[in-house]
Amino acid sequence: MRALSHNSIIFEQKIIILKCRLMRIVCGLDVHKDGIYLCILSSTVEIIEKVFGVLTLELYEMRDFMLKLPQ
């Protein structure tokens, strides 16, 4: 894993914001053995972060959560 400097983190955040302006909404998932971390960035730069479990019912909950988001 590479170490990120403060400048490279800011640069990566700017790229994410630029991509988000091209798209109405973007979502990232970070999948681990015991949880799924969801991060959503809308074109209004609203950030939604939520953690879900990995059991089937929790995955359905994550799906339902994402389907209820405004288009």
Image: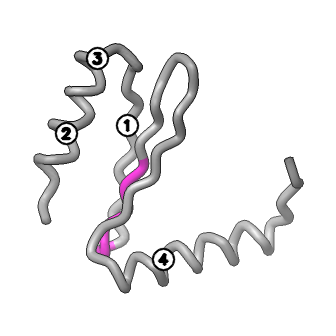
Q: Using the image, tell me which numbered label, if any, was put on residue 65.
A: 2
Q: Secondary structure at mark 3?
A: helix
Please report whichever mark, 4 or 2, sits nearer to the chain's N-terminal start: 4
Amino acid type of the residue that numbered disc 3 sits on in the rendered structure: Thr
Q: Which residue is mark 3?
A: 56
- Asked if labels 1 and 4 touch by Cβ distance under 8 angstroms, the answer is no
Q: Which residue is mark 4?
A: 17
Give the residue displayed 37% in from the left and 64% down from the top. 26
Which picture quadrant has residue 59?
A: top left
Give the residue displayed 11% in from the left and 47% down from the top. 68
- Asked if labels 2 and 1 touch by Cβ distance under 8 angstroms, the answer is yes
Q: Which residue is mark 1?
A: 50
- In this rendering, which labeled residue sits more in front, label 3 or label 4? 3
Please report whichever mark, 3 or 2, sits nearer to the chain's N-terminal start: 3
Boundaries of the magenta span: 39-44
Separation of residues labelled 3 and 4 (CA atoms): 32 Å
Mark 2 Cα shell of 10 Å, populated few (<14), some (14-19), many (≥20): few
